[in-house]
Amino acid sequence: MPPTDYNTLLQTALTLTPEQRTQLIQALLKSLEQPDPRPLQPSNGDQWFGSLPKRIDSVEFQRSIRSEWDD
């Protein structure tokens, strides 16, 4: 299924009969119980290595935070 705008999906779902909405909800809930078959592939490997930008030295960052505690 190609990417679809959330609002488009919602508007389509609102046109369904109550029975069809119930079936859709049940199918969505069932899909949440299944593991996602897509492998984890980060678009950018950097996102897996902490939250600090590379230009900040992590030890120096820690020292600066700890020095604020002493103030």
Image: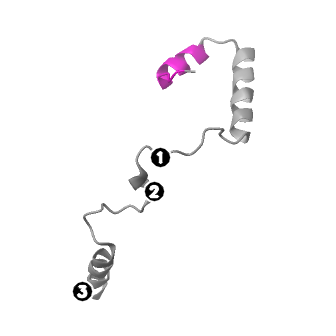
Viewer-nearest residue: 1 or 9: 1
In this view, 49 is above or below 24: below
Please report contact status of discs 2 and 1: CB closer than 8 Å, yes or no.
Answer: yes
Q: Is residue 11 magenta?
A: yes
Q: Is residue 13 magenta?
A: yes
Q: Which mark is residue 48?
A: 2
Residue linked to disc 3: 71
| Whole-percent x, y for residue 18 in the image | 71, 16
> Closer to the N terminus: mark 2 or mark 1?
1
For residue 38, what is the image quadrant?
A: top right
The residue tagged with tag 1: helix, strand or loop?
A: loop
Q: Residue at x 42, y 52 (%)?
A: 45
The residue tagged with tag 3: helix, strand or loop?
A: loop
Q: CA distance from mark 2 to mark 1?
A: 8 Å
> Closer to the N terminus: mark 2 or mark 3?
2
Q: Which-is-in-front pick, marks 2 and 3?
A: 2
Please report contact status of discs 2 and 3: CB closer than 8 Å, yes or no.
Answer: no
> Closer to the N terminus: mark 1 or mark 3?
1
Q: Which residues are magenta?
A: 2-14
